[in-house]
Image (cartoon, helix red, strand yellow):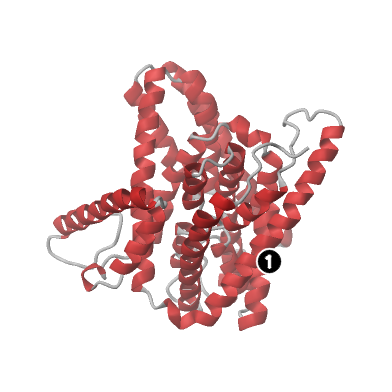
Amino acid sequence: MIFASNTVGSAASHTVLLMVLLLSVTLLVALISKRLRLPYTLILVVVGLLLGFLPILSEITFNPDIVLFLFLPPLLFEGAWNVDITQIAADWLPIVLLAGPGLLLAVAILATTLHLAIGLPWLLAILLGAIISPTDPVVVLSLLKQLGLPERLCIVVEGESLFNDGVGVAVFGIVLGLLLPSLGMAAVTGNFGHLSGLTITLASLWLLLGGPLLGLVMGWIVARFLLLVDDHLIETTVTFSVAYGAYLLGDTLHTSGLLTVVGAGLVIGSYGRNRQMSQHAQETAQEVWEFIAYLANSLLFLLLGIQIGASHFLDALPGIFWAVLGIIGGRFLMVYLLVPVQNVLARRIARGRTLRFLPKPRPLPANWHPVFVLAGLHGALSLALVLSLPVKFVQRKLLEDIVYGVVLVTLLGQGLALRFLLPYWPIVAEDVP
């Protein structure tokens, strides 16, 4: 099921009825959003927020296991499938800096803010930083494309989000594994309490790097297999299976399943699709994945709004205030620190020898910086992570409420700011000299 229901009796028919109701709402919102020229995902959150107050939908809950397995793998695969790996490679430096060191810097700033402002213990503050910091680009990308902004700008925003989701989940697993033993609880994501520093370091590196490597290898193998098949339905089914198979493979081998999905999607989308699949199969797979992404995003953002509306997150207003301040401050700092660093590195590399395996990086225009800052929206992954915490986890309710507030403020606040400010912001389409 896409959501959990507390009803008894004819549970199956009730589930189908609720599913039809939710899909009807998403269709209505899609029609309204076209007239308002707003991303339908933003309106879905608002509608879900209102529906969350209705008693008739109080039985619908945001199931973290369903989100992490049912929704996120195909959404990440579809995003990677539609990104040309050569475009990602052309801007590998800003993407790596923002998704790696940038995310860690954002986690550190947010954790420091929460520790100093509301006295949250360091490990809990870092854990909350790892939960909130990964970005959700769906709303941002739809706006950027709707307003006709440069494709390169969209590629960097999407590339960062594709990889920082996996990095954020890896950091979440590492910190939770360290935290649970200190609370006297059984670890659910890997107990590091009795391990040496070297073992923890190696396990952390495997969490961060193992997923992409597994995904690249799996994607290459599947792409070669597609050479043996000449049936558009079978080829489309293979891509669908890889989206979930890659996640299960990464999770089984105790690395990031999400990064495994991204790696496999990039290879199959850029190499396997263009070189190993027939034109008919490419068109069929593209239509199928477009529908899957639309359906998953629609239900996900609607359920996200319903979950927030049904919660009582206003009880944690001080924590929400400082968390929003910390996440925006961290985003501002990472962009205005790391993007200039990448520009300096790009110019130095350009004057040196040609890189053997990667294209020479290019500087980014300075007036893209505000867009990168506002692009730091947070959504379903943050909710899924905080709701996946053990029920008896210390201060779980406080962490939930803070995440609800941050997600709502960034989605609506920054999302609407992008919509109304971007048309008047001078965007440079070409590279800076």
Q: Quadrant where the C terminus lies?
A: top right
Please state which of residues 335 and 174 is positioned toward the viewer in this rendering.
335
Q: Residue at x 57, y 38 (%)?
A: 214
Position of residue 316 measured from the top left corner of the image (x, y, whole percent): 49, 80
On screen, residue 183 versus residue 9, left or right, reads right
Q: Residue at x 35, y 57 (%)?
A: 44
Mark 1: few/some/many CA within 10 Å (<14, 14-19, 20+): some
Please state which of residues 430 and 314 is positioned toward the viewer in this rendering.
430
Position of residue 323 measured from the top left corner of the image (x, y, whole percent): 58, 72
Q: Quadrant of residue 50?
A: bottom left
- Residue at numbered disc 1: 108
- Note whether 369 is above or below 313 in the view shown: above
On screen, residue 21 versus residue 394, left or right, reads left
Name of the residue lying farthest toward the front: 424
Position of residue 309 measured from the top left corner of the image (x, y, whole percent): 35, 70
Position of residue 57 measured from the top left corner of the image (x, y, whole percent): 24, 67
Disc 1 on helix, strand or loop? helix
Q: Quadrant where the N terminus lies?
A: bottom left
What amino acid is at disc 1?
Answer: Ala
- Note whether 274 is above or below 300 in the view shown: above
Please state which of residues 69 and 306 is positioned toward the viewer in this rendering.
306
- Note whether 382 is above or below 367 in the view shown: below
- Note whether 135 is above or below 306 in the view shown: above
Please state which of residues 400 and 369 is positioned toward the viewer in this rendering.
369
Q: Quadrant of residue 374?
A: bottom right
The answer to whether residue 62 of the structure is visible from this angle is no
Q: Residue at x 38, y 36 (%)?
A: 289
